[in-house]
Image (cartoon, helix red, strand yellow):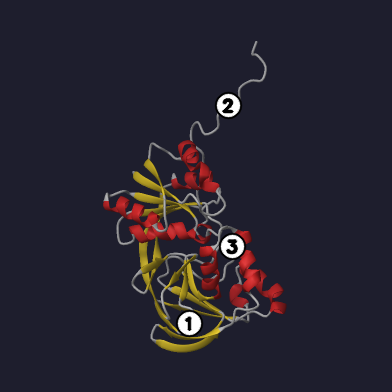
Amino acid sequence: MKIRVVVNPISGIGRQKKIETVLKTNLNQDIFDYEVCYTERIHHGTELAREAADKGYDCVVAVGGDGSVNDVVTGIYGTNTRLGIIPCGSGNGLARCLKIPLVPALAVRALNQCHEESIDVMTINDKYVSVNLSGVGFDAYIARLMKAAKSRGFSAYMSFMLREYATYQCNDYQLTIDGRQYTRNAWLIAFANSNQFGYNAAVAPLAKLDDGLIDVVVLDKIPIEHLALTVPLAYANHFELSQHCEMFKAKDILVEGNIDKWVNIDGEAENLGTSVHFVNHHQALNIYSRDITRPIVGIVNEVKPKRPTHPVK
């Protein structure tokens, strides 16, 4: 099978820097004929993925974080080309939801399984796509700050969160959820295909990648004195128990009143205006994921034997 590996050289915390060596020693080349391309500018990954799809490649593998995955999906969406993921970002929300190993060598070996499945895709304002989790409010604001930041990773993300938490205020939103209208004063509203932003923080624990529905999480601003009780619920996969959130499931959601105009789309900030329209497209993307019923095995010549330290008699 012909695959193109699209590498974001500045993603996350640098695990992608030895990707060519990792591919050479772990990818089953009896199955895959591969090439490696490096992105050179913002959304270059979309161009590289679209070119591969136009040429009939079987799969485009995103090496990076959720933003890099989104770029590749944008390029191949609507084609027969599959998505592959080697997670090298900081949050890696979609990869974590799919149980893809965060160690690049193991993620490559998972590709060797050729385990194919179909997942949903959200379109946003008929222009953008999202496969992990998007949102308006505080998470979009943090994504906007991260977009302009010089450093990435969990420490940078938490630094912005802690700095901005106290001052960011709730806003009024008008929601039309599958035709029903609601008004909510919210700190953030998440629209989830997978269950988490990343870092194993599952804010939408009931979300499924292939159920044809978007999980909508409306979150109040959590008082500081409640954080010690509420945050662990996300990491325990029981955020639905929080008194500060309200959850819906829907296929079509219109959000009006997004006064700061920014939207978090799979970890990257985009300015979409005050009105944002989310639509689910059921099982619209074919991917290579991990078959959790089978072990991830190595390949021949993965480990070279050590040379003897003393002459052999």
Q: Is residue 202 left or right of residue 265?
A: right
Q: Which residue is mark 3?
A: 200
Residues under numbered marks 1 and 3 in contact, where contact means CB atoms less than 8 Å apart: no
Looking at marks 3 and 2 on the same chain, the residue that comes earlier in the sequence is marked by: 3
Q: Could you say which is closer to the camera, residue 158 or residue 237?
A: 158
Looking at marks 2 and 1 on the same chain, the residue that comes earlier in the sequence is marked by: 1
> Rounded to the nearest whole Å, what is the CA distance between mark 3 and mark 2?
37 Å
Q: Residue furthest top?
A: 313
The three-letter amino acid code for the residue at tag 1 is: Ile
> Rounded to the nearest whole Å, what is the CA distance between mark 2 and mark 1?
61 Å
What residue sits 59% from the left and 62% below the top? 200
Q: For the C terminus, which image quadrant? A: top right
- Disc number lying in front (1 or 3): 1
Horizontal and vertical percent for residue 298? 51, 39
Horizontal and vertical percent for residue 159? 64, 65
Looking at marks 1 and 3 on the same chain, the residue that comes earlier in the sequence is marked by: 3
- Disc number lying in front (2 or 1): 1
User: What label sits on residue 305 in the rendered view?
Assistant: 2
The three-letter amino acid code for the residue at tag 3 is: Asn
Q: Could you say which is closer to the camera, residue 232 or residue 169?
A: 169
Horizontal and vertical percent for residue 206? 52, 71
Q: Which residue is mark 1?
A: 259
Q: Quadrant of residue 161?
A: bottom right
Q: Is residue 86 left or right of residue 224?
A: left
> Rounded to the nearest whole Å, what is the CA distance between mark 1 and mark 3?
29 Å
